[in-house]
Amino acid sequence: MSSSVVTITDAEFETEVLQAKQPVLVYFWASWCGPCQLMSPLVNLAATTYRDRLKVVKMEVDPNPVTVKQYQVEGVPALRLFQGDELLLSTEGAISKDKLDSLLDSHLNSN
């Protein structure tokens, strides 16, 4: 079900996110994070819903401190939306499906 969400590491961040041809939603999470368990299905759904316009990747925070520090992820779950090396959107904490859709629609509706 979540096969459209790619798990990445610090080493893969530049290639998978910053050099991607389409916008990329990065989902920062942790195995010990309760709200992350609520957000994961929404992130998977967004990957399916927006698959023609958006790439979705997830990164576990604990084993990937370089990217976490670089993009100032201070709490999980966290979302960052990139277009190339430009950060378009940044949220921390669990959000609703409607809020996630609204945020993505506002940045992806240029098509």
Image (tube, rainbow, N blue to C red):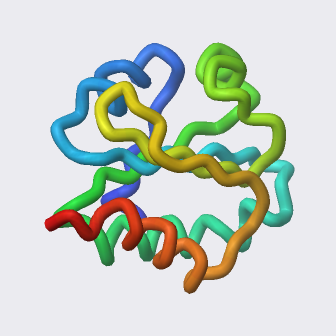
In the image, residue 29 above or below residue 48: above
Q: Is residue 109 left or right of residue 71?
A: left
Q: Is residue 1 visible?
A: no
- Which residue does the image show at 78% across and 59% down from the upper left? 93
The C terminus appears in which quarter of the rendering? bottom left
**Location of residue 21 by image quarter:** top left
Q: Nearer the viewer, residue 41 or 103?
A: 103
Q: Position of residue 64 (x, y in %)?
A: 64, 22
Q: Position of residue 40 (x, y in %)?
A: 60, 65
**Location of residue 42 by image quarter:** bottom right
- Counting every numbered tag in the picture gives 0
Q: Is residue 53 left or right of residue 99?
A: left
- Which residue does the image show at 67% across and 53% down from the upper left? 91
Q: Is residue 27 left or right of residue 65?
A: left
- Which residue does the image show at 82% across and 44% down from the upper left? 75
- Which residue does the image show at 40% across and 31% down from the upper left? 86
Q: Position of residue 84 (x, y in %)?
A: 30, 31
Q: Position of residue 61 (x, y in %)?
A: 70, 33
Q: Is residue 84 visible?
A: yes
**Location of residue 16 by image quarter:** top left
Q: Nearer the viewer, residue 90 or 56?
A: 90
The N terminus appears in which quarter of the rendering? bottom left
